[in-house]
Image: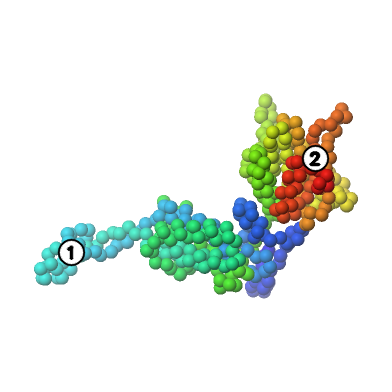
Amino acid sequence: MVPLRNPYGGKVYGSIVVKPRLGWINIYEILEVIDWKYQPLFLKEEEPIISDGILPRWFKAIDTLEAIAQALNILMKGMNSKYVQSNVPVGNVDWNSYSIKSVPYGKYSQFISKITDYSIDLVVHRQFKGITRIISQDISSNRVPTKVKYKAKQLIMDIEKKLEGIPTEQPSIEKLKKIEVPSFYRNLYKKAVLKCEEYLSQSKFSISSGNYYGLPWSIEMDRLFEFWVEHWAHIFAKRIGARFYSDIRKNSRIRFYNLGNWKSLSQLKPDIIIEKGSKTLIIEVKYKKHLEYLQYGNFSPEIVEEHRHDMHQLLSYMSISGNNKRIGCLLYPTLNGNISNQFATLISYTNTKADVDVMLCGTPFHPEKILNLIENIWGEKYASFA
């Protein structure tokens, strides 16, 4: 989703949307289900646009609040000079004032001194409070997912507690850009300031219209599909008390141990592995239309060769398992789940059954359907989803 600019002047006059081949999906619900572990890439230099499917400004609320909260963990203090009245001379005493305003009136123990105060009342903190107030208003919308609201409110409470007593300042990108941070605080504070600038860049509209405007963005559908499948496969594994490994969690790596002069691959990365007892299920997530092509016979030699490569990849992963029963699945996306799944068992070169099953399955972005599919594969109820 990107803005369209007038070539004569460069002003944005519309937007162009490239939709996934599976049809337009409810991106908010999917990202919320996977706990926002995978997020779109935003075109930060572009102006907010209005379009169907935009991601409104509250989408980045959590990132912004987390950056502010992390910066405040090392709460920066600044040196301010101020005048105080005391009963004993401290700091730089204003002796002129003492001789004119205190001594003539018998107030010998009244001194006006200039001292250095280490205060947290800084421009950057006032700006942080201003941004926090804007986010607090933004997340009050009924359109904001409950998980986002809950987490944002917890972060807001933490920030306001740390900045208690600090005046709130109207947020300004210009002011944020001028803020100078000492080197000790720079890493965390600079990140927080940049997040605030990004959030403000989306806040050019009213609260209500802000629900329909947002930054242009793009997302890799193959990665989103992989995160989606991995999420539900992990839920299934927990339900049955199985061990779970995945490339996303970086614990499914198969390594090549050098026994002499090995200079080839160092590791393989199966997408998903589920193990319990003497059974292993390996799922390779493929954002391709191969299952549809194979079902309707609409495929070229190039597609057949690519599919052969995917099948060899799956079988190589399955060969690592020492379990007696091994199941491998190439899992493809479908629009509505109407494409038939395909399954087979392997017969070895000695014409004996290898107790190794392989299948080609499709699933839409639908929680119940993908859970039922994985359950049937694991339970080897092939007839029930053929």
Residue 113 coordinates in the image, percent (x, y): 22, 63
Q: Which mark is residue 317?
A: none
Please give the name of the residue rendered at 63% of the width and 39% of the height, measured from the top-left corner: 251
User: Which quarter of the figure has residue 262?
Assistant: top right
- Circles 2 and 1 in contact, beta carbons < 8 Å: no
Q: Which mark is residue 358?
A: 2
Pick whichever, 319 or 6, lies toward us: 319
Q: Circle 2 sits in a helix, a strand or a loop, which is it? A: strand
State the residue position of label 1: 111
**Residue 347 in view in this figure:** yes
Residue 17 coordinates in the image, percent (x, y): 71, 65
298 on left or right of 112 = right
78 on left or right of 193 = left
Mark 2: amino acid: Val
Mark 1: amino acid: Phe
Q: Does label 2 or label 1 sit earlier along the sequence?
A: 1
64 on left or right of 281 = left
User: Which quarter of the figure has residue 91?
Assistant: bottom left
Q: Circle 1 sits in a helix, a strand or a loop, which is it? A: strand
Pick whichever, 32 or 8, lies toward us: 32
Q: Is residue 51 above or below residue 247?
A: below
Q: Quadrant of the N terminus?
A: bottom right
How is colour applied across the structure in the image? rainbow
Please give the name of the residue rendered at 68% of the width and 51% of the height, measured from the top-left corner: 228
